[in-house]
Image (cartoon, rainbow, N blue to C red):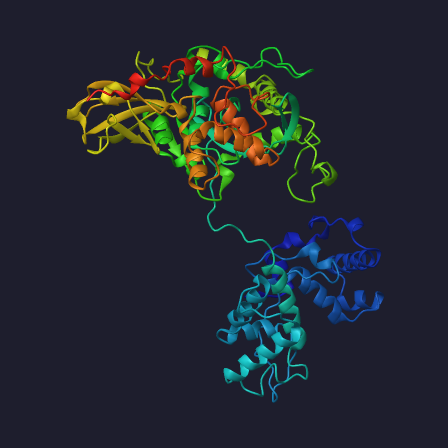
């Protein structure tokens, strides 16, 4: 309901004092608008003071109706809406959206065009939705969208009115432009509004901040944006070869912000074994690695929490937040987290990393130091931090060992640095304080014969073809395993369980279905030369299937293949993983330059050489097998 300005003063007599109106900063206005604002303020001050509108208008060279409109602008309006007061004194200031209160103009009844277009959108059913649908398809680039401009939109507007049987003697057909300017303004405004980013449909509400240590742990992996090199001894010459990027797996506590452990995987796609190795960092005490890089050293007191004592290796973890990577959904990883560590696994929503914002912040913190290296790849092809193209054929200056040591030093140094969100306390100090004074749940002490997280079991059958004169065997990962443990006629074609270490599958422990331990079986001598993991066996089998290496000595053949194609950074990184799996020095792996039938080089005193001694020397008596 609209009321006159006099009725407003009768209802609110205090509004007659213009000095009590809201303050408007006139210095923020332009000079011309400031002059008009001060003039309007003087006019209303005199009228509200008791002078007649006709006399005030005569002094300022205005008409009495102009003064009355000014009073209505400031004090009139809807009875349920507060008056504009001082904002009405500012010229050319639109206070509210114009509303059409009169009927639309017709040929027989002329009228102004104020708010006619908006009233037309409200009166014609589906008109506004039809125009918005066209504009949205144009902005979003849909398949059925058009490259719109004001003229096509206006033509669609008139066509829709014709199809809706809108009368020809009513607006907009009463005006010569047919509301072209209104359509153009509406199109440009809606086009700009629809081009703005949309608000996500699902709003993730804020969670309560975790206050207890180990109540929530976030784990994620990050591709380290830095290329490195490694030295390989080929025929007595040390060659530096370029390596592909490695992946950092990191675990971080939410309450304290401390880094709990990390693992560097020599691949772009970490596996479940790498995740299990990261979990072992939380359970077993951390030991610092020997730093050989000049000028690099651990800050005094910079450690991971697992090195603080036995209690820090037995926390009862509440929630472990992961993303939806395939390696995170591996069965043995979930069993390790839920059954052995007593944690709850939360994989979160796909493409929604907000729930793991703390671990993402950790990778950003690490990149500040990693991107200082000249061989950083950068975030995109045009990143100024990216390595120059003229250096791409040369090995980077930083070695893999130096990069690993630098990452370890940076992560451990963060744990002793005071941070602001902990009121100037370091993450390690907060963990010590809560472990000493708070009731932090701990897991029970481990049993004496707790199985290793790297051990897995599989059901297989003992086979011995009738025409085969050899001993019974077990077929495991494309290899025949034999041993005295299964040289029994009663076991032929019977199912058994084999337990193996995924880090070294040269030997398998055989257990019957009723739980009786039979012993171990071993792979052929061609697979006994070096310790190799399950993942390495599968990779070698793929190369054998594609005839890339020879079958008589697959380990040496795969090593020679990696050495031959060492110029490719990804294969050079596989060479590093191979040396580490075989317990060989990764920085100086000596092999012959020419392809040999069997690799003859084994470092004396290493684990590989000791394991090689377990294989008995061949003799003709080995042909005689127990039947």
Task: Name the residue furthest bottom.
Answer: 108
Q: Position of residue 67 (x, y in %)?
A: 74, 66
User: Can residue 247 be seen here?
Assistant: no
Left or right side of 559 for 176: right
* Residue 359 placement (x, y as % from top left): 53, 31
| Camera-side residue of 604 and 211 | 604
Left or right position of 494 against 619: left
Task: Count the marks.
Answer: 0
Q: Which residue lies most toward the left here?
A: 490
User: Vertically, is 40 above or below 445?
Assistant: below
Please identify the quarter of the rendering in which residue 149 is found.
bottom right
Indicate the quadrant containing the N terminus: top left, top right, bottom left or bottom right: bottom right
* Residue 382 makes an appearance in the image: yes
Q: Residue at x 64, y 63 (%)?
A: 5
The residue lying toward the viewer, choosing from 219 and 235, is 235
Say left or right for 15 vs 306. right
> Which of the two residues, 8 or 627, is positioned nearer the viewer here?
627
Q: Position of residue 44 (x, y in %)?
A: 75, 59
The picture places residue 306, in percent across and down from the top left corner, at: 47, 15
């Amino acid at each position: 309901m609209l009321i006159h300005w006099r009725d407003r003063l009768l209802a609110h007599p205090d509004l007659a004092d213009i000095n009590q109106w809201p303050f408007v900063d006139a210095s923020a206005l332009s000079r011309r608008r400031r002059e008009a604002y001060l003039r309007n303020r003087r006019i209303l001050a005199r009228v509200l003071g008791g002078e007649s509108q006709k006399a005030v208008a005569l002094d300022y060279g205005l008409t009495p109706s102009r003064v009355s409109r000014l009073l209505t602008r400031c004090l009139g309006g809807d009875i349920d809406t507060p008056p504009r007061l001082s904002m009405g004194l500012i010229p050319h200031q639109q206070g509210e959206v114009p509303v059409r209160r009169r009927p639309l103009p017709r040929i027989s009844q002329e009228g102004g065009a104020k708010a006619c277009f908006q009233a037309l959108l409200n009166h014609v059913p589906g008109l506004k939705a039809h125009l918005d649908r066209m504009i949205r398809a144009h902005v979003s680039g849909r398949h059925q969208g058009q490259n719109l401009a004001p003229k096509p939109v206006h033509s669609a507007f008139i066509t829709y009115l014709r199809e809706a049987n809108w009368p020809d003697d009513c607006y907009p057909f009463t005006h010569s432009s047919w509301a072209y300017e209104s359509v153009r303004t509406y199109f440009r405004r809606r086009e700009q509004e629809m081009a703005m980013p949309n608000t996500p449909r699902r709003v993730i509400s804020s969670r309560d901040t975790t206050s207890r240590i180990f109540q929530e742990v976030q784990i994620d992996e990050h591709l380290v944006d830095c290329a490195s090199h490694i030295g390989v001894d080929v025929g007595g010459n040390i060659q530096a070869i370029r390596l592909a990027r490695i992946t950092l797996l990191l675990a971080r506590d939410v309450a304290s912000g401390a880094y709990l452990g990390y693992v560097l995987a020599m691949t772009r796609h970490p596996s479940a074994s790498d995740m299990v190795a990261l979990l072992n960092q939380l359970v077993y005490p951390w030991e610092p690695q020997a730093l050989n890089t000049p000028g690099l050293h651990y800050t005094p007191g910079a450690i991971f929490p697992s090195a603080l004592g036995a209690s820090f290796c037995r926390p009862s973890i509440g929630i472990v937040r992961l993303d939806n990577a395939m390696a995170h959904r591996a069965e043995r990883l979930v069993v390790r987290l839920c059954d052995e560590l007593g944690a709850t696994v939360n994989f979160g929503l796909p493409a929604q990393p907000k729930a793991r914002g703390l671990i993402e912040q950790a990778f950003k913190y690490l990149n500040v130091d990693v991107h200082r290296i000249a061989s950083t790849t950068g975030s995109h092809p045009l990143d100024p931090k990216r390595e120059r193209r003229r250096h791409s054929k040369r090995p980077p200056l930083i070695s893999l060992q130096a990069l690993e040591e630098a990452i370890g030093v940076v992560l451990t140094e963060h744990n002793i640095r005071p941070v602001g969100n902990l009121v100037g306390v370091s993450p390690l100090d907060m963990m010590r304080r809560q472990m000493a004074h708070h009731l932090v749940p701990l897991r029970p002490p481990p049993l004496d014969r707790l199985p290793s997280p790297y051990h897995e079991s599989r059901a297989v059958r003992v086979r011995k073809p009738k025409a085969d004169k050899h001993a019974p065997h077990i077929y495991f990962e494309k290899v025949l395993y034999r041993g005295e443990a299964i040289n029994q006629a009663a076991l032929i074609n019977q199912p058994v369980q084999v337990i193996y270490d995924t880090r070294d599958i040269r030997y398998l422990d055989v257990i019957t279905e009723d739980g009786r331990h039979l012993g171990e079986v071993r792979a052929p001598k061609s697979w006994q030369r070096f310790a190799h993991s399950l993942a390495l066996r599968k990779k070698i089998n793929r190369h054998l299937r594609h005839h890339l290496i020879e079958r008589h000595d697959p380990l040496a053949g795969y090593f020679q293949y990696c050495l031959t194609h060492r110029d490719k950074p990804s294969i050079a990184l596989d060479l590093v993983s191979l040396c580490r799996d075989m317990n060989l020095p990764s920085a100086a792996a000596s092999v012959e330059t020419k392809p040999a039938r069997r690799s003859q080089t084994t470092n004396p005193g290493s684990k590989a050489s000791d394991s090689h001694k377990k294989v008995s020397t061949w003799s003709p008596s080995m042909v005689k097998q127990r039947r």
